[in-house]
Image (cartoon, rainbow, N blue to C red):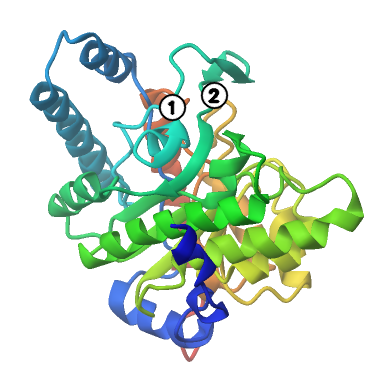
C-alpha cells in the first residue's frame, strides 16, 4: 500500500471526461425523470436488526441465519421504495452497525474496540475504530448486499460507501505520518471497492463525506492544505469509474459557504446536502458560486420526528428550483434514516415523492 500510494499521479484523481459530457452519458444510461427522487442511504435500524447482530456476536445464531435476516430486511426496504415510487433506490444498510466502524472492521490497519463507546449526539453512541497501521482492503465489503438489492428491482440501486475524510475524522488515527498520507491509503482501499461495485453493474455509487466541513481547521492559514488533500482523497476514491457511472456524495448539517470551492473540487456528479431547516439557503449559495453539477438539497428534516406534508415539501422544492434548474435538481431527505422509525419514514417519503410529482407535472414542457 505504501508503494501504491507513492505511485499515485494527478491523473488517478481525475474522471476521464468533464462533468457536462458525463452528465449526458449518465442521463442516457439511467433514464431518470426530472427531479429524480432518492434517499441518502440508510433506513431505520430496528430493534430486531440490533438484536440479530448481538445474537450473531454471542453465537446464538450462525452466519447463514443472520444473512437470511439481512436479506429479508433488504427485500422489505426495496419493496417499500418501489411502492413509494422512488426513482433511485438503496439497500437500506441493515447489515451496518455504524458508517465508519462497519468499514473499519473489514480493512487491515484498523482496530475495533469492544467497549470504547463515545457519544455522538443525544442517546446515540458509537465505537470509533483505531487506525493504527497501513490500510488495505482484503476483499469486497459491500458488493454482495448491493448486488442482492439490485437483483430485486429494475430501478437503479446506489452503492453506499463512507468517504476517506470521514473514515479519518470519526476514528482515532495514527499520528506518526501526515494525515494526507493516511487519507490516500484509505482512498485507495475505497477505490478498489468502487471499482468492484461498478464491475458488479452498480450504476450509481455514493461516497459520503459528512465530516468534510466538520474537520475544517479552525486556523484559516491551515485550511487550504487540508482541503487540498481532502478533496484529492475523494477524487482518488472515485476517479476510476466510467463516465456513465454516476458518483454521488452527501454532507450533513454544516455551514457550507466557506467550503464551496472544495465542494466543486470533489467533482461529484450529484451532491446532497441539508436544506430543509435552512429553507434552501445552500441551493442559493451554490447557485451564486456558479456550481455546475447536480444538487439534492434536502426537503425532509430527518432529525425531527415531525412528518412534513406534501405541500411543505413542494414549497421547499419550488424554492430550490429558483436557484437550481430542474435538470440538475434532485429530491431527497436531509440525511440518512437510520435513527427514525418506520411509520414516520413511510409517511415522509410518500409525501416527498408526491411533492416531486406535483412540482414535476407543473414544469413547462419542451417547446412551451
Q: Please state the horizontal and vertical placement of residue 189, each as a whole percent of the image.
A: 41, 54
Residue lying furthest bottom in this view?
367
> Do we see residue 339 in this rendering?
yes
- Identify which residue is drawn at 45% across, 47% down: 135
Q: Say above or below: 256 vs 242.
A: above
185 or 76, which is in the foreground?
185
Answer left or right for 278 relative to 270.
right
- Identify which residue is drawn at 44% across, 25% down: 112
Answer left or right for 57 relative to 281.
left
Residue on which disc 2 sits: 305
322 or 32, which is in the foreground?
32
- Identify which residue is drawn at 35% across, 69% down: 32
Point out which mark residue 344 bears.
Answer: 1
Distance Cα–Cα, label 1 vs label 2: 7 Å
> Which secondary structure, mark 2?
loop
Point out which mark residue 281 bears.
Answer: none
- Quarter in which the N terminus is drawn: bottom left
> Which secondary structure, mark 1?
helix
- Identify which residue is drawn at 57% across, 51% down: 182
Q: Say above or below: 256 vs 34.
A: above
310 or 118, which is in the foreground?
118
Answer left or right for 85 relative to 180.
left
Q: Please state the horizontal and vertical placement of residue 224, each as a whole percent of the image.
A: 80, 62
> If you read the primary sequence from the N terminus, does the residue marked by circle 1 or circle 2 appear first?
2
> Do we see residue 331 in this rendering?
no
Q: Please state the horizontal and vertical placement of residue 55, each as a whole percent of the image.
A: 23, 11
Q: Quadrant of residue 287?
A: bottom right
Q: Residues within 10 Å of mark 1 (few under 14, many from 20)?
A: some
In the rendered structure, are the residues bearing label 1 and label 2 in contact, judged by CB atoms less than 8 Å apart? yes
Residue lying furthest left in this view?
64
Amino acid at each position: 500500500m505504501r508503494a501504491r500510494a507513492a505511485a499515485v499521479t494527478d491523473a488517478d484523481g481525475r474522471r476521464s471526461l468533464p462533468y457536462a459530457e458525463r452528465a449526458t452519458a449518465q442521463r442516457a444510461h439511467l433514464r431518470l425523470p426530472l427531479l429524480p427522487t432518492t434517499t441518502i442511504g440508510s433506513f431505520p435500524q430496528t430493534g430486531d436488526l440490533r438484536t440479530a447482530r448481538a445474537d450473531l456476536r454471542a453465537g446464538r445464531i450462525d452466519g447463514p441465519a443472520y444473512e437470511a435476516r439481512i436479506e429479508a430486511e433488504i427485500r422489505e426496504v426495496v419493496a417499500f421504495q418501489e411502492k413509494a415510487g422512488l426513482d433511485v433506490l438503496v439497500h437500506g444498510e441493515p447489515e451496518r452497525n455504524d458508517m465508519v466502524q462497519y468499514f473499519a472492521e473489514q480493512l487491515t490497519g484498523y482496530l475495533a474496540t469492544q467497549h470504547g463507546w463515545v457519544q455522538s449526539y443525544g442517546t446515540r453512541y458509537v465505537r470509533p475504530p483505531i487506525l493504527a497501521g497501513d490500510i488495505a482492503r482484503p476483499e469486497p465489503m459491500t458488493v454482495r448486499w448491493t448486488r442482492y438489492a439490485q437483483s430485486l428491482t429494475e430501478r437503479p440501486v446506489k452503492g453506499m460507501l463512507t468517504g476517506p475524510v470521514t473514515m479519518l475524522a470519526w476514528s482515532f488515527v495514527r499520528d506518526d505520518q501526515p494525515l494526507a498520507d493516511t487519507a490516500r491509503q484509505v482512498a485507495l482501499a475505497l477505490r478498489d471497492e468502487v471499482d468492484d461495485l461498478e464491475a458488479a453493474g452498480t450504476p450509481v455509487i455514493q461516497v459520503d463525506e459528512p465530516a468534510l466541513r466538520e474537520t475544517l481547521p479552525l486556523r484559516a492559514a491551515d485550511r487550504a492544505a487540508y482541503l487540498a488533500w481532502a478533496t484529492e482523497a475523494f477524487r482518488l476514491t472515485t476517479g476510476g469509474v466510467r463516465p456513465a457511472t454516476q458518483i454521488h456524495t452527501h454532507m450533513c448539517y454544516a455551514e457550507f459557504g466557506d467550503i464551496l470551492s472544495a465542494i466543486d473540487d470533489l467533482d461529484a456528479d450529484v451532491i446532497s446536502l441539508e436544506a430543509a431547516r435552512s429553507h434552501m439557503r445552500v441551493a442559493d449559495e451554490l447557485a451564486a458560486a456558479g456550481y455546475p453539477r447536480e444538487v439534492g438539497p434536502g426537503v425532509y428534516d430527518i432529525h425531527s420526528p415531525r412528518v412534513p406534508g406534501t405541500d411543505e415539501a413542494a414549497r421547499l422544492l419550488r424554492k430550490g428550483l429558483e436557484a437550481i434548474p430542474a435538470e440538475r435538481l434532485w429530491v431527497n431527505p436531509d440525511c440518512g434514516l437510520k435513527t427514525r422509525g418506520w411509520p414516520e419514514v413511510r409517511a415522509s417519503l410518500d409525501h416527498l415523492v408526491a411533492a416531486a410529482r406535483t412540482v414535476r407535472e407543473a414544469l413547462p414542457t419542451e417547446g412551451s
